[in-house]
């Protein structure tokens, strides 16, 4: 399982990152920014508006060049427009230029400038800026590590509806990072994050229920939250579903068992793919059985590899 805390790319209010539960992942994850099809006249009018000190137009132009909607990505131009937007007190503009400094895009990387700009964005009311500021304090980027300040900014952003902040604050409560360890508070924050569509919050809930971390083990609840996270494209949660389903079936004895075994195999549980192969082999569906044995073998299930070898020997 993966862990907190990371500071994702947060441009114009988009925050996406994966925080699961056991290994710190410091990678940044780029969000998908959907802009309209490039229209040269639209850009020219926005440039005129920016020249007339329209901060939102300047920030939008930064997005145009950052995401290559002008024909190609141009981070240096994106920096110019984000800087101007921030100078005009655009909350999103300050957050975005902070990100550019944070990651060295179109400008020399400078964590001190990044944290200063995230502070400015947060001051202007950009809650993703508050979140990024909390992540920098948590990771000790641009400043000494400071869990107290991290918790303060995560709480501020969480209360304003930033789901990643709720998830990270939940992690801090779950592990007693500066705040007093409080599993119930962690659960509550993970629930909030999950309800707001944050995959890592759903994943954390699934993990807690699967492993009985501060709660009674409940495979049905673990399945529910892993499924929610998987539907939000969280690969780790999709993989964990295989383990959750696999624990339910020792031997396929009924149609209900067969259904669960299929789900477990679908989510890459090698052992259950092997057992499912044996089931189909017993019921004389050799083609399906072989495909299942191959999948299980590719997933590292040794009995399936040996069984395939035996089948080839018999046919030679």
Image (tube, grey):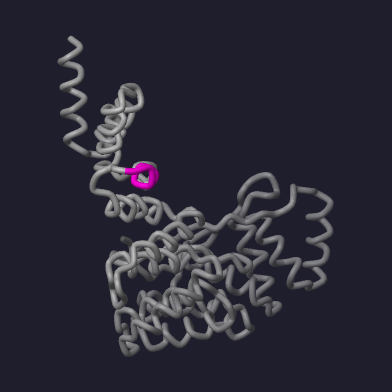
Residue 256 at x, y percent in the picture: 38, 47
Q: Is residue 258 magenta?
A: yes
Residue 255 lies within the magenta run: yes
Picture quadrant where residue 277 is located: top left
Count of numbered badges drawn on the protein: 0
Q: Is residue 31 above or below residue 265?
A: below
**Which region is colored magenta?**
254-259
Quarter in which the N terminus is drawn? bottom left
Q: Is residue 309 left or right of residue 69?
A: left
Q: Could you say which quadrant of the image residue 111 lies in?
A: bottom left
Place of residue 140 in the rendered image (x, y in percent of width and height, measured from the top left): 35, 77
Q: Say left or right for 12 vs 199.
A: right
Task: Depth check: give the residue in front, 248 or 119.
Answer: 248
Where does residue 210 sit, x and y in percent of width and height?
31, 64
286 left or right, relative to 111: left
Residue 114 visible in the displayed image: no
* Quarter the C terminus occupies: top left
Question: Residue extending furthest front?
Answer: 254
- Given residues 282 and 93, the one toward you in this image is 282
Q: Is residue 160 above or below residue 71?
A: below
Q: Position of residue 227 (x, y in %)?
A: 45, 57
- Return the residue nearer the eye: 56 or 221: 221
Relative horizontal placement of residue 105, taking residue 91 as reference (left or right)? left
Identity of the residue drawn at 47% across and 81% down: 154
Q: Is residue 181 among the parts visible in the rendering?
A: yes
**Residue drawn at point x = 28 percent, y = 42 percent:** 252
Main SS of the magenta part reads helix
């Amino acid at each position: 399982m993966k862990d907190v805390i990371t500071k994702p790319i947060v441009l114009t209010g988009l925050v996406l990152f994966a925080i699961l539960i056991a290994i710190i992942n410091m990678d940044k994850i780029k969000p998908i920014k959907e802009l309209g099809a490039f229209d040269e006249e639209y850009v020219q009018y926005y440039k005129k508006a920016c020249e007339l000190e329209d901060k939102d137009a300047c920030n939008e132009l930064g997005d145009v060049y950052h995401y290559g909607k002008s024909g190609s990505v141009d981070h240096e131009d994106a920096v110019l427009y984000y800087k101007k937007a921030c100078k005009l007190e655009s909350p999103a503009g300050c957050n975005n230029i902070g990100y550019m400094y944070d990651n060295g895009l179109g400008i020399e990387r400078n964590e001190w400038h990044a944290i200063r700009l995230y502070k400015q964005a947060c001051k202007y009311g950009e809650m993703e800026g508050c979140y990024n500021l909390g992540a920098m304090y948590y990771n000790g980027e641009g400043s000494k590590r400071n869990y107290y300040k991290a918790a303060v900014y995560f709480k501020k952003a969480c209360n304003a509806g930033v789901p990643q902040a709720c998830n990270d604050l939940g992690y801090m409560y779950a592990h007693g990072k500066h705040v007093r360890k409080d599993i119930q508070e962690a659960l509550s924050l993970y629930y909030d994050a999950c309800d707001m569509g944050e995959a890592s919050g759903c994943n954390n809930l699934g993990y807690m229920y699967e492993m009985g971390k501060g709660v009674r083990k409940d495979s049905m609840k673990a399945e529910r939250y892993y499924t929610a996270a998987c539907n939000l494209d969280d690969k780790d949660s999709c993989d964990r579903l295989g383990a959750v389903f696999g624990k339910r079936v020792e031997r396929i004895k009924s149609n209900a068992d067969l259904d669960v075994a299929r789900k477990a195999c679908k989510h890459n549980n090698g052992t259950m793919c092997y057992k499912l192969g044996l089931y189909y082999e017993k019921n004389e569906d050799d083609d399906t059985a072989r495909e299942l044995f191959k999948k299980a073998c590719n997933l590292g299930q040794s009995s399936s590899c040996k069984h395939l070898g035996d089948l080839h020997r018999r046919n030679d």
